[in-house]
Amino acid sequence: MKAFCYNNLKNALKKPLRKEEEILISFLVNWLRARWKTDFSIHFEVAYNRGWLPTYNRIKNNIHSKTYLFFLSTYREAENIVLSNKLYNPAKKKEEQIIGPNFVLNESFTEDEYKNVLYAFYCLYFYNTDILRKCKISKIFNWMKIIKAFVKNDGLYKQYENFFYENNIKMNAKITRMNFYEKTYDYKDSATINMINNFFSWANVVQKYSYWKSYSETDPDFLRRSLFYSLCIRVPQKGTKLEQMRNGLIIRLLYYWYYGVVEEHYVDIIFDILHGKYGEGDKHLIGRLFAEKSVSDKTALNYFRKKYTRYCKDRNIGQDKQVSILKPSNNNDDTQDESQSEPTAYSAIPLQLSKIPDGFTINQLEYLAKLLYDGNGKISLLATIDSKNALPYFLGAPTIPKPPSNYKISWNKDMKSLKYFITRLYDTNTMHGVWKITREAFLIFSKGQLREINSAQSLSNLSSTGSKGYLNIDSKIKDFIDASIASAKSLK
């Protein structure tokens, strides 16, 4: 691979990416950056409940010895990811999250114990998406140029051919190629640790790209799932115990990135997400990105609309089940008046935070909205009945009916009290985009009337300290918010 890069790097970088490739890469990077601070336990539950990870019953039935040991050094790495990023599963108490130094799964281990371990490994491999999220977009473009040239010329296959030939280990090469045709994703006892191997086998890279593609497409469901995880993967950092996995893992992902970007199969993954195949959290993020494109980038939106026409046709998705912002009917005439042909921002999806506050039920959120609306005789924070009805939806509850796409919640007090209310419900340090969504969904009381929060007023930078206490808000308002939240949470 080094020889290829040295000899061909300059030529590869001179060739520009196609406009379609740049649009697709930019959209994916924006999604991954928005996804980073969402509730990660939700992504794990989607994967586990849909059978994409080795289930408890399958693992337990495959245990032939009395104990089921884990590589503790690898587990410690997973444990550090959970602790340093506060990725605690909200369904469990914090002290139940981490397993002790002598942990084994024996014949009597419970499903909760198993899922606790599996969750830590899932965080280790799929939290952060650092390989795409942290890079500048120009660097990713250049990286993709090199991957295109490398895969197109079967550079990976040739490197392994030379390696096998030079080391006179043709028998090993034959065995490795035979392993390519094994169903490595039929999980075995070590599946918890070898999660990456089950999605991205080493045997893939000893084949020519055309062979890999032909074989992979015989199992389209597994291929699409692997494509999804090829975007979400966390590459081990330098200086960690898993550093030796870093280069090998990147190599194993090259075919997926080429297949996804150059052949544009990542577009189908985006639409699968939008139709709920990967959970409500990712569906919500993708929907918001498309709504933003409807205002900020007409070229990108039209590219996705054309692809969506083909996607719906291939899957026989009727007009009534299509996403309105991408419906083929919106793309009949690119020259028509944009004010009529393009939806306004967020017209397809009402504003909503990605999850319900920890410890709340839907009924409790509805009761909280009622308390804030009814007030205590002197203070009422929600000015209208529509605001009372919309607040639970904004806080992540799947209320029926949904509020209108352009709804606003009328908050009877200032911006500082609104920020205090949100921070009482959420750990805003671990939720991406919470202040932007709040600013767009609320009206605040300012200068004698309800007003929109303009872009110059930053909720995220609003001071949280002051001589009068938290945010300098009125102590009576603070006490009312605290009492309302406590009363709502106590509702049975």
Image: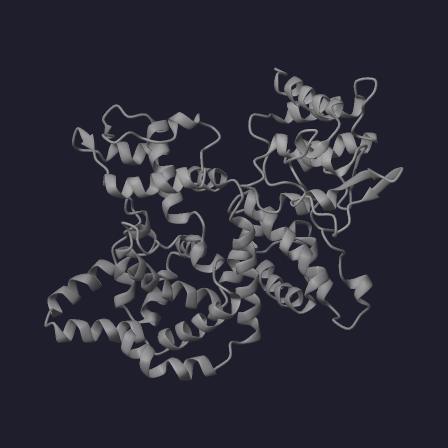
Instruction: Look at the image and tell me in which quarter the C terminus lies.
Output: top right
Q: Residue at x 58, y 46 (%)?
A: 432
Look at the image and tell me whether residue 413 can be seen: yes
Q: Residue 243, how many percent across, how many down?
A: 29, 55
Q: Left or right: where does residue 123 sit relative to residue 479?
A: left
Residue 53 visible: no
* Position of residue 6 in the picture relative to residue 374 (left or right): left
State the image coordinates of residue 2 (x, y, percent, origin top left): 29, 75
Q: Is residue 269 above or below residue 152?
A: above
Q: Residue at x 33, y 28 (%)?
A: 113
Q: How is the image coloured?
A: one colour
Question: In front: 78, or 295?
Answer: 78
Who's the residue at 74% across and 34% down the image?
390
Q: Is residue 390 above or below residue 74?
A: above
Front position in the image: 55 or 132: 132
Residue farthest to the front, as pictured: 467
Q: In percent of the image, x 25 and y 61: which residue is there?
A: 203
Badge count: 0
> Which is more toward the observer, 95 or 491?
95
Quadrant containing the N terminus in the rendered view: bottom left
- Where residue 376 sits: x, y (%)? 79, 18
Q: Position of residue 46 (x, y in %)?
A: 47, 40
- The answer to which image quadrant residue 52 occupies is top left
Residue 24 falls left or right of residue 299: left
